[in-house]
Every structure is written in structure tokens, then in C-alpha cells.
Amino acid sequence: MTQGSLAPSESPALSPGPLSGPQPANLGDILERVLDKGIVIAGDIRVNLLDIELLTIKLRLVIASLDTASQVGINWWKADPWLSADAANGSDKRALEEENRQLRSRVRALESRSRHDG
């Protein structure tokens, strides 16, 4: 009886080489690809009763990086004061400009009234 080696032998089929198939992508690679290219998921839900439409819900989901979304013209977050400091400052600025305009108008009215009275 001969005793063989207890070490596992390498099989050419299990060793990586030029003939091995594509390597599985990890979650980071998949997320990077999705954010780089973007993905759109769209769907409609309709509830009908006897051919009468009772409810329609339209769902649109866009998953992309901010750069990719901006490149295709999606930039609603830039104008939302809750999501953008620039937009928040801009809305404050507009409010201050409006208040300033109203105050200037009132000052002119008071000045013209004082001219007529004096």
C-alpha cells in the first residue's frame, strides 16, 4: 500500500488563467457603473372599476450621480432651498430685495407727503 501526499493537488480547471470567465463585480463596481451612466425606472399603476379609471399613479425613479443628472438637464435640487445653500440664500436675498423695494416706496411716499404739507 503506497501513501500519497495529503496536500491538495491543483487542477488546471480551478486555477485562474486566460481561459477563466468574467469575474463577478462587487457592489462598489455596480454602484459606480449605475451612478456613472444613470438608470431610469418608470411605471404606472392604474386602478379601474368597470372600465372607469379610479386612480392613476405615475412613478418615475432616476438613479444617477449629481454630475450625470446635471449633464442630462436634471438639476431641480439647485433651486430647492431645503437642498441647496445657494437656493436658500437666493430666496433670502429675493425676500430682502422685495422688502427693500417696499421700504423705498414707502419712504418716497412719506417724502412727497411731507413736501406737500410743508
Image: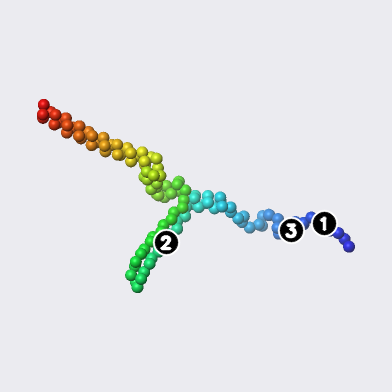
- In this view, the residue in front, 72 or 60, is 60
Q: Which residue is mark 2?
A: 43
Label 2 crowding class (10 Å Cα cut-off): few <14, some 14-19, many 20+?
Answer: few
Say which amino acid is labelled 1: Ser
* Residue 99 at x, y percent in the picture: 26, 37
Determine whether 107 is above or below 37 in the image: above
Mark nearer the N terminus (1 vs 2): 1
- Regarding residue 28, the answer to whether it shows in the image is yes
* Residue 21 at x, y percent in the picture: 63, 58
Determine whether 113 is above or below 21 in the image: above
Whole-Å distance between the Cαs marked 2 and 3?
49 Å
Mark nearer the N terminus (2 vs 3): 3
The residue lying furthest to the bottom in this view is: 50
Q: Confirm or deny contact between disc 2 and disc 3 (CB under 8 A).
A: no
Label 1: state its secondary structure: loop
Q: Which residue is mark 1?
A: 5
Q: Which residue is mark 3?
A: 11
Relative side of 111 to 37, left or right:
left
Q: Mark 3 or mark 1, which is nearer to you? A: 1
